[in-house]
Amino acid sequence: MSSASVTRSLPMSLLRTAILLLCLFPMIAAAAEPVLPAEHVDADGPYVFRSGKRLQAHWICDDHVVSRTLRQRTSGERLPPQCGYPHPLRLTAPAASAAAVLPAVPRIVAVSDIHGQYGLLVRLLRAHHVIDAQDRWSLGRDTLVIAGDVFDRGPQVTEAFWLLYSLQQQAADAGGAVHFVLGNHETMVLYDDLRYVNPKYLRSAQLLGRSYPDLYGADSVIGQWLRTRPVLLRIGDTLFLHGGISPEAVPLALAPAATNAAYQASLGRPKAEVKADPATAPLYDGKTSPIWYRGYFDGRLDTPAVQALLDQLGLRRIVVGHTSMPHVSSFHDGRVIAIDSSIKEGQSGELLFIEDGQLSRGLLDGSRVPLAAGVIDAAD
């Protein structure tokens, strides 16, 4: 039978589907192609690994590996820059697992979905005096929350991680706090799903003789730090997380410390394994898990349902990243705040400010304006 005869015999709905699939096939095929390493890395690093009583630091400078060995000291070891991250680092002993529930604080600044856009992040934080001109902590006793997704897409993932690692130390010294909440891209990279990795990093891994996930293994300074970060973080009456709490995930949110511990223990396990294991499958479900959920924005939950969920959890609001918006936006009459302001595009970005219960957003020029009104994109 000819293709024309087959087409004539198809019902109209199936015909439309077939035409759509044919149109999408080139894009699907292109998306399935593996990411190939870049040909050259100008600057990347450091990647720092613990080996017995020593630290092994490696940079990629002009496509060549530069290495240094340091002794581990309990007070921390200072590592000067070579290339890549431009500031000295204080490398401390592995941190304890972060708390899941913290008391309310007067002022919180939040941002999410950096995706390797270190330069843009620095501009935004400097504009609002979160950091000074030397990229050191300037927020005193206040709190900064990053709601996940430093990995993938952009060209300065390494620098962004070291900035947050350093700011966390500096904030603690000043009586403030920096909290990094894991996103889905942190879990993806660590279980070797590299669909969105910047080709630069595959070249870095190639030069260092490791896989890219192994650069963040349990023997690495940043890998150890990631394995102590939370997925759920409650500060006062506000819950911060990457994706959101679905009705199916309410039990996970009611036991945040246990949920965080389960995520931390699962990081780096193979993707198929964590999705097949009944103990971890709810953590990685692509539609309902705390790192993937988008139901506040697509019509799955209306405002009364969101309020019912907040009542179950004893919350005033939920702050999430993951779902990209043009601005930091308020949904469901302020019950959900979306803070993925599309920094990943490398053009602009915004901060959320929560100050004694009052909310505003900070723009790249340093100005402050009200939150944007979110628009629900309901399914047909």
Image (cartoon, helix red, strand yellow):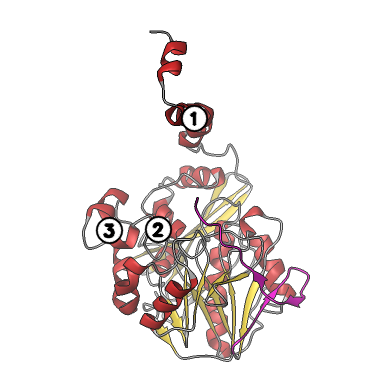
Disc 1 to disc 3, how far (Cα)? 35 Å
Where residue 129 appears, as percent x and y from the top left, is 71, 79
Residue type at mark 1 is: Arg
Residue occupying image coordinates x 58% and y 68%: 339
**Eyeballing the image, is 349 above or below 359?**
above
Which region is colored magenta? 357-380
> Mark 2 or mark 3, which is nearer to you?
3
Q: Secondary structure at mark 2?
A: helix
**Eyeballing the image, is 6 above or below 211?**
above
Where residue 298 appears, as percent x and y from the top left, is 50, 58
Residue denoted by label 1 = 16
Say whether residue 360 is magenta: yes
Residue occupying image coordinates x 71% and y 60%: 348
For residue 138, side relative to residue 115 (left or right): right
Nearest the eye: 168 or 35: 35
Nearest the eye: 370 or 109: 370
Where residue 241 appears, as percent x and y from the top left, is 46, 71
Residue denoted by label 2 = 187
Q: Secondary structure at mark 3?
A: helix
> Mark 1 or mark 3, which is nearer to you?
1
Dot 3 crowding, Cα within 10 Å, few <14, some 14–19, many 20+: some
Q: Main secondary structure of the magenta part?
A: loop
Q: Secondary structure at mark 1?
A: helix
> Mark 2 or mark 1, which is nearer to you?
1
**Residue 94: which quarter of the image?**
bottom left
Residue denoted by label 3 = 281
Label located before the other in sequence (2 or 3): 2
For residue 245, side relative to residue 364 (left or right): left
